[in-house]
Amino acid sequence: MPKQTVCKVSELPVGERRIVDVKGRSIGVFNVHGEYYAIRNLCPHEGAPLCRGIVTGTTLPSQPGEYIWAKDGEIVRCPWHGWEFDITTGQSVFNPHKMRVKKYTVTVEPVAEDESVETFPVTVEDGWVVVHA
């Protein structure tokens, strides 16, 4: 899979998403609690733009009358028919062993310095700022 620069870290705050095109594939990139995840923007049910759906959480298995809310901000709900997928794994909520969406690796890389800009090391000596040119 080719690399695709999405945006600066500061441009994708917690809880936000970006949808990008990588070689003809629409991919949603999400910031979930400060970690970055990417999944295919295509619901396997009927081809809806999955990553445009509501980001929410889900209830966990529990006793009758008890509701345990979890994974807040980690579940995306298909905007067409409500199928839910875990952004962090790509697995479906209703059938995680058989239904999933493609997950992609996301890395945070340092911004490359512009080599056309000349820089010099700077130190502080006895209260003076010194440029070493």
Image: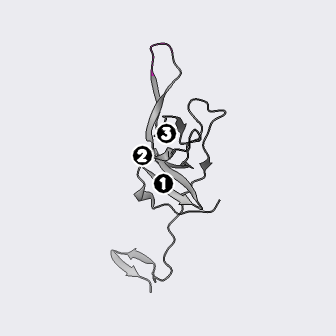
Q: Nearer the viewer, residue 131 or 12?
A: 12
Who's the residue at 52% across and 34% down the image? 83
* Mark closer to the observer (3, 1): 3
Instruction: Judge from the rendering whether residue 130 lies leftward or rightward of residue 51; answer left or right.
Output: left
Left or right, 130 with reference to 6: left
Query: Element at badge 1?
Result: strand
In percent of the image, x 35 and y 77: which residue is there? 129
Q: Amino acid at mark 3?
A: Cys
Query: What residue sits right under mark 2 in the picture?
Result: 15
Q: Which mark is residue 19?
A: 1
Tell me the quarter of the image containing the C terminus. Answer: bottom left
On screen, residue 98 above or below 42 = above
- Which span of residues is magenta-colored? 63-67
Establish if 121 lies above or below 93.
Answer: below
Mark 3 or mark 2: which comes first in sequence? 2
Q: Earlier in the sequence, mark 3 or mark 1?
A: 1
Q: Nearer the viewer, residue 34 or 133?
A: 34
Q: As drawn, is 42 to the left or to the right of 122?
A: right
Mark 1: few/some/many CA within 10 Å (<14, 14-19, 20+): some
Q: Position of residue 5 (x, y in %)?
A: 52, 63
Circle 2 packing at 10 Å, graded few (<14), some (14-19), many (20+), is some
Label count reads 3
Under circle 2, the secondary element is loop
The residue type indicated by label 2 comes to Gly
